[in-house]
Amino acid sequence: MNKIKIGLVGTGYIGRCHAIAYAQLPTVFNLQDKIELEYLAEISPELAAKRAKEFGFRRSTANWKELVSDPNVDVVDICTPNFLHKEIALEAIRNGKNVYSEKPLALTANDAKEMYLAAKKSGVKTLVGFNYAKNPTSQLAKEIIANGEIGEVIHFYGTHNEDYLANPNTPIDWHCYRKFAGLGALGDLGAHIVHMAEYLLGAEIDSVCGDTQTVIPQRPSPEDPNKFCTVENEDQASALVRFTNGVMGTIETSRIACGRKMGLSYVVTGTKGTLSFTQERMAELKLYVHNDPSNRQGFKTLLTGPEHPDYRPFCISAGHGIGFNDQKTIEVRDLIDGLLNDKPIYPDFYVGYHVSRVLEAIALSASTKSWINVSDI
Amino acid sequence: MNKIKIGLVGTGYIGRCHAIAYAQLPTVFNLQDKIELEYLAEISPELAAKRAKEFGFRRSTANWKELVSDPNVDVVDICTPNFLHKEIALEAIRNGKNVYSEKPLALTANDAKEMYLAAKKSGVKTLVGFNYAKNPTSQLAKEIIANGEIGEVIHFYGTHNEDYLANPNTPIDWHCYRKFAGLGALGDLGAHIVHMAEYLLGAEIDSVCGDTQTVIPQRPSPEDPNKFCTVENEDQASALVRFTNGVMGTIETSRIACGRKMGLSYVVTGTKGTLSFTQERMAELKLYVHNDPSNRQGFKTLLTGPEHPDYRPFCISAGHGIGFNDQKTIEVRDLIDGLLNDKPIYPDFYVGYHVSRVLEAIALSASTKSWINVSDI
Amino acid sequence: MNKIKIGLVGTGYIGRCHAIAYAQLPTVFNLQDKIELEYLAEISPELAAKRAKEFGFRRSTANWKELVSDPNVDVVDICTPNFLHKEIALEAIRNGKNVYSEKPLALTANDAKEMYLAAKKSGVKTLVGFNYAKNPTSQLAKEIIANGEIGEVIHFYGTHNEDYLANPNTPIDWHCYRKFAGLGALGDLGAHIVHMAEYLLGAEIDSVCGDTQTVIPQRPSPEDPNKFCTVENEDQASALVRFTNGVMGTIETSRIACGRKMGLSYVVTGTKGTLSFTQERMAELKLYVHNDPSNRQGFKTLLTGPEHPDYRPFCISAGHGIGFNDQKTIEVRDLIDGLLNDKPIYPDFYVGYHVSRVLEAIALSASTKSWINVSDI
Amino acid sequence: MNKIKIGLVGTGYIGRCHAIAYAQLPTVFNLQDKIELEYLAEISPELAAKRAKEFGFRRSTANWKELVSDPNVDVVDICTPNFLHKEIALEAIRNGKNVYSEKPLALTANDAKEMYLAAKKSGVKTLVGFNYAKNPTSQLAKEIIANGEIGEVIHFYGTHNEDYLANPNTPIDWHCYRKFAGLGALGDLGAHIVHMAEYLLGAEIDSVCGDTQTVIPQRPSPEDPNKFCTVENEDQASALVRFTNGVMGTIETSRIACGRKMGLSYVVTGTKGTLSFTQERMAELKLYVHNDPSNRQGFKTLLTGPEHPDYRPFCISAGHGIGFNDQKTIEVRDLIDGLLNDKPIYPDFYVGYHVSRVLEAIALSASTKSWINVSDI
């Protein structure tokens, strides 16, 4: 292939973010003429046509099945609500399409496995939208860890906390129903920090012990504020984890954590140093190196710049700042690069499946009050 | 006009930034079909063609005079080195083109005045690239001040410090020569903070007392590290200022300030509160309100989100982060909006001219060791 | 009693801290003539005499049994290594002395229980040195929580991480042996954060699930760097906890956490707000209140001052700063106040015993890989 | 001398702080039996006796003249309102007493000069209470600068801003009258940052250009809220300065700076690095060193600990925190050490006099709108 033709399914919050990434990609990464915004699917012909115009896509449809079988589509980009990921992905794979799916890959680990295996069997390339790992700052964190600059990792603490459902009067929405969302905070947010943990350490989580809670068990119906509906999944979750290499870790997630607006954060402790990061200050990485002289020790605030991974194409000056959509642009660059040059793409459906297993293990562990091996999921 | 045709002159650092802004603009602000990347000028046909391809422009030329007189160009976007701004802008105005120029508007206040008067006389619209004022966080600061939330402003402290010439072994470049750059740190960086001061306070600076220094008087030639060339303008400058409304202020700028990578910062003190900001944490505004209960007082860190100006089109979730190029995208939106809807555009050449007068007053003040009225420049 | 006569046993690190607290106490809290530094015990007559002179005590002895039975001693202050706490405390209680003991109360929960029951039976007053709870900033946190300013607490995350054993070449010391220290990081540091959790929430932890690790299993002998000795207790520990009121929490502690010098920290999330604190910035409490207007939300940094608990006696100006020893001075004030005015003193041996149970439950849980009820310890 | 007998005059805010310092001094610095709290003067016999009891002084008087001529007083410690400093100091010097005076040394530079010359002539030792320079963190800053770790200093920015008079309804007090306070914010707060600048750089300020403003020209009488009294000195001041070594600097001070509770701060920029500090985080020094690898550059947060000057006597663990009174304790240690061992004491009356000249030069400069040489004051 020397030009990648995109078929986008779904144009809500995250679909719009993908569209912005596609828009700036050619200029940022010098990929003019390498992508074509070919086809867009939404739930009605009108909305599909409207979004196609807004996002710069050539054609539109109200039937995603037409899109996933269209000969002029190279990659199906799935930005629908979570419960549709599986069906669309499987149909796309059946049609030999490469698939770029938002996280979480599916509502259950079993569904994710089916998707992973289908892709593996068919040989198509896949990508899951764990975009925070594309932030140059977190890429830098991975580089520092891989270089051994903090020695061997001995502890990981990570969170993805937000407060979008902190107000008990916020009406119930799809996030709160198992059939639409699967898990609650774990599926929506926990997926990111579980992935980040495994990405940074280069090791999988292999056992977990979790605790979860639905703090606000009922929420008003969006139609009738006097009618209350049951929240079916967890508002917050915490888990002790162990990685395959024996490293201890703790992971926490919440959708009701007042004040945390983009609360993906991590502290990675090694035998010789420590890294600390929060996505709310997405351009800053704090690095402590233990062998500094004892009277000159301290956490150094690295401000991401052109010396760091994937920053320079956006700006040649340090500290000028990468935004949320820029992360997605790097993710899309990885997709296009993988397809154009027939290279592996990370993180693929295997990774997405593994993350789903970890999340499901945490949920199961919480209900059984016991440690669970991820391999048992 | 119902579609704006862009002619871009210059494709270095900031030209590339404009190109990224143009690329994402239609999708972010729903302006598909409202702009055309029409014409691009560079110093050779080959480079012009190469950049036109990379940036998605239709045509290219090695002769900017062809561009500024082209009937299919609505706005001339000047991203050349500073010393060319005047000639290109005047020629564009002569051809009835609207002009979007990078800062500083010109090498001297007199030149800037000529440009401002030419634009005024011809009736074309103008815009100067003081992009930091487009950051949603600084727009929020302006809103808070304008609302009176911090009472009446009584003090302004602002800096724009960077360290791109901190190393004395860094070879001399165009920034250091009067004929190419005009002023030194004042022209390159000070322009931004002087503009920001006037933007935030809604008042002009009318007298100044400055001090400047060329700390590193000679730098190696880029061709021959053993040959040393004279630096002709200031490395750092500080000034006491007074605004038309009597408010006291202090402004500092440096290009040799070790560790400051994007050191545009301000503290605005009012009778009832205070705002504090640094561009290195471009999504955070610290707000103190004095009438909180005495045991609950403190600076609150506001994290920019969709409730704040011009953030929502990029992302509907708070705290997800705007990047440097996103500021430029908002600036370009203002340009397109002004042209499409025949509205005033801010900051125009008058503003750019006034900023140049302030900077020149600071430089003159430093050499005469006396207070200078800006109106005397 | 109208004057409290102190008998101090042990003058190492923490004993010296007590001595400084006693020294400034009368002036800070206007308690001149209310305490007498009566008697001091150390391991040799020479050291005892030397320290008595340095710390301003009237008499000294190399036999702590003389001290605990001396008729002129009202309170026995135990600053010895941990393994001696029990014996000295029991003997002091037997002699009818009030007892002020450093944490952890004892090497095991059973020992702590014996001490608690002995004190209860005899009716003497007791105090355990959980001094971080005396920091005006953490007292403020408790006040804010108790007021309901952050709604009902729904989550607690706390750490006490330090790096005093981070270097694997640091020779083994008493902290690493069960017979001298009992637990490792849990006993030395975890005790503080477990206490803080219960203090802040006003609720006990009633079940735990922990994980622990001895990352550096052997350390060089202090006598012979080529000889390696076995570390007998944990370097780091994490635990999921549940409080009696059902609140979820996570607690972590480490003595090998590179870069954490005074890493006692907590984040307390409520239904209406959040508090965040780290002892390294011991004068700052971050408070988020969810019902601020949506475009003015954010964490406010409260800087401790005279409007906050127990700050004013040190300084009448806000933000001037309380130091580590000042916390201890407040603790000692609580001791003297309780004895002079026959009031309850907090935290007493019951609290110390309960903290020991929680720590031991975490350790047991880690070894059995299961949840443990604290009441089963 | 082998024991220093203290005579304290004045027991308000800062007198109390001195008393706390004296109280903990012997224990912290192992100086038992080296000081005697001999004599205390206040405005009435009752208050003097009360404070003597509270602060642990042996004798008291309502007549400071008795104190300064008492044969058993070695050093007169002046903590009175500013306008009394001169008379008491001169009388004490006349009696051959060493003098420890709070800042500002006097209401005018001329008065300060008279005091300095009197002390010089009589040969007594003097000390001025610029206690912020005794903070271990600022001592560390000085050490780093003196070591050349940030190269040669090229710029100093410093503030001492507070908000104790920010509310226009706060009744007028002695700070606002020339006859009681001399200068306004400059004298009360500016003195500290001017001293800090000269201390850190090891160079004097030799010319200044200032601007000042009385933002709130009238305040209610403390007796009658409907009666308004004229504020006679400046609420805020800013100045460009040059040091003897040619270094540029800017100094700002305000007593109406909303939100700044202990706003003494500085940024010292050198040719090879930068230091940044604010007293509100009095244990943290941020250090940037330019020759770190370009992808590992950043400000490192040094947390004061036992490896740094004068911290260890307070605590042997890093990051545990020094408080405001601990600075004063170090200052008093310097006093006692200088007297016991007949060593120079810093900062003495010469330094206090020089600071007064700088402050007066700033005020004069503001009224004449011109640069002023400090030597002309």
Image: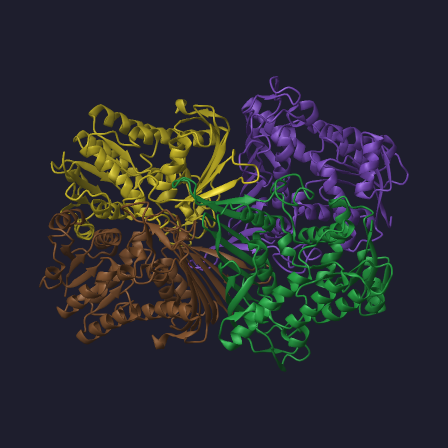
Chain colours: A brown, B yellow, C green, D purple
Quadrant in which residue D242 is drawn: top right
Work out which residue is located at the far left of the displayed protein and give it: A71
Q: Position of residue C225 (x, y in %)?
A: 64, 79
Kindly identify the residue that appears in the image at 35 percent across and 28 percent down.
B354
Work out which residue is located at the far bottom of the displayed protein and give it: C227
Q: If the image is split into quadrants, where does the C terminus of chain A sit?
A: bottom left
Q: Nearer the viewer, residue A124 or C2?
A: C2
- Residue C83 in view, yes or no: yes
Kindly identify the residue that appears in the image at 56 percent across and 43 percent down.
D266
Q: Nearer the viewer, residue B331 or A253?
A: A253
Q: Position of residue B257 (x, y in %)?
A: 47, 46
Q: Nearer the viewer, residue A17 or D307?
A: A17
Quadrant in which residue B204 is drawn: top left
- Residue B251 in view, yes or no: no
Q: How many marks?
A: 0
Kindly identify the residue that appears in the image at 61 percent across and 45 percent down.
D200
Q: Position of residue D192 (x, y in %)?
A: 64, 38
Does residue A53 appear to the left or right of A284 in the view shown? left
Does residue D10 appear to the left or right of C306 in the view shown? right
Work out which residue is located at the far front of the displayed protein and give it: A227
Work out which residue is located at the far right of the displayed protein and give it: D71
Does residue B280 appear to the left or right of C5 in the view shown? left
Q: Position of residue C217 (x, y in %)?
A: 56, 78
Does residue D95 appear to the left or right of A315 in the view shown? right
Q: Is residue B198 above or below residue C34?
A: above
Q: If the image is split into quadrants, where does the N terminus of chain A sit?
A: bottom left
